Image (cartoon, rainbow, N blue to C red):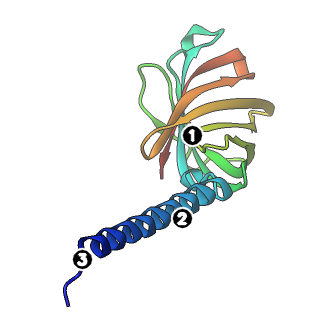
C-alpha cells in the first residue's frame, strides 16, 4: 500500500513538532542546571597569583605573590581556604615559603548568576599584621583573571586563578 502525499506531509509535520519539543526540553534542562548549579567551574583547588602594580613603596612594585586556594560554591556564595606559597620581588627569583609557617586563611565571596564574574576577599596574617585582599575576577577558558586590592601597603594590581 502506497502512502499518499498528504499522509507523508502529515508525518513530516508530526516528526518536526516532536524534534522541536525535544530540543526545547533539552534547552530548558540545560538552562535550569546552569541556574541551579552555578559556579561548578570555580570549585576546586587553584593557584592564585597577584602582581602588584600600584603600591606606596616602589621597591614592592611588580612583586608577585602566589597562593594555593580551595573553593566551594553553594548557590552563588563562594567559600574556601588557602595559604601563601611564595613570592617574587621585582627583578628577583621566586622564593617558595618552604619550611616557614604558612598560616591558613578563609575566603568568602559571591559568584554572579551567570557564573562568569567572581568577587571574593580574604584576610591573612603576616608578620603579626592582618591584611585584607579583595579580588574581582572574570571567567576565561579554564581560568579567571582580574584585579586585586589589598589594605597591606595600600596595594593593587592584577590577579589570576589557574587550576592547580
Q: Residues within 10 Å of mark 2 (few under 14, many from 20)?
A: few
Q: Are marks 1 and 3 in contact (CB under 8 Å)?
A: no
Mark 3 or 2, nearer chain start: 3
Mark 2 or 1, nearer chain start: 2
Answer with the quarter of the image where residue 126 lies: top right
Q: Which residue lies at the image location 41% right of the left edge and 66% below the top edge?
A: 19
Left or right of 126, for residue 10: left
Q: Which residue lies at the image location 63% right of the left edge and 30% below the top edge?
A: 136
Q: Which residue is mark 2?
A: 25
From the viewer's perspective, is the residue at label 3 or at label 2 nearer? 3
Mark-to-mark CA distance, 1 and 3: 53 Å
Left or right of 13, for residue 112: right
Q: Which residue lies at the image location 55% right of the left edge and 28% below the top edge?
A: 146
- Vertical placement of 95 versus 146: above or below? below
Q: Which numbered dot is residue 116?
A: 1
Answer with the quarter of the image where residue 55 lies: top right
Q: Secondary structure at mark 1?
A: loop
Mark-to-mark CA distance, 3 and 2: 32 Å
Can residue 67 be spotted in the picture? yes
Of residues 35 and 15, the one drawn nearer to the viewer in this rendering:
15
- Vertical placement of 17 versus 118: above or below? below
Q: Position of residue 35 (x, y in %)?
A: 65, 53
Q: Which numbered dot is residue 4?
A: 3
Left or right of 7, for residue 71: right
Left or right of 13, for residue 152: right
Q: Which residue lies at the image location 67% right of the left edge and 40% below the top edge?
A: 112
Amino acid at each position: 500500500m502506497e502512502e499518499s502525499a498528504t499522509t507523508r506531509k502529515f508525518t513530516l509535520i508530526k516528526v518536526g513538532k516532536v524534534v522541536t519539543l525535544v530540543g526545547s526540553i533539552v534547552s530548558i534542562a540545560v538552562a535550569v542546571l546552569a541556574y541551579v548549579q552555578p559556579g561548578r567551574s570555580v570549585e576546586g583547588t587553584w593557584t592564585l597569583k597577584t602582581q602588584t602594580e600600584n603600591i606606596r613603596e616602589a621597591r614592592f612594585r611588580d612583586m608577585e605573590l602566589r597562593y594555593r586556594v580551595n573553593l566551594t560554591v553553594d548557590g552563588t556564595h563562594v567559600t574556601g581556604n588557602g595559604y601563601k606559597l611564595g613570592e617574587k620581588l621585582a627583578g628577583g627569583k621566586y622564593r617558595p615559603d618552604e619550611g616557614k609557617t604558612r598560616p591558613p586563611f578563609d575566603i568568602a565571596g559571591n559568584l554572579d548568576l551567570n557564573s562568569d564574574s567572581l568577587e571574593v576577599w580574604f584576610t591573612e596574617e603576616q608578620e603579626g599584621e592582618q591584611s585584607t585582599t579583595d579580588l574581582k575576577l572574570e571567567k576565561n577558558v579554564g581560568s579567571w583573571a582580574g584585579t586585586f586590592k589589598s589594605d597591606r601597603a595600600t596595594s593593587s594590581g592584577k590577579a589570576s586563578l589557574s587550576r592547580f
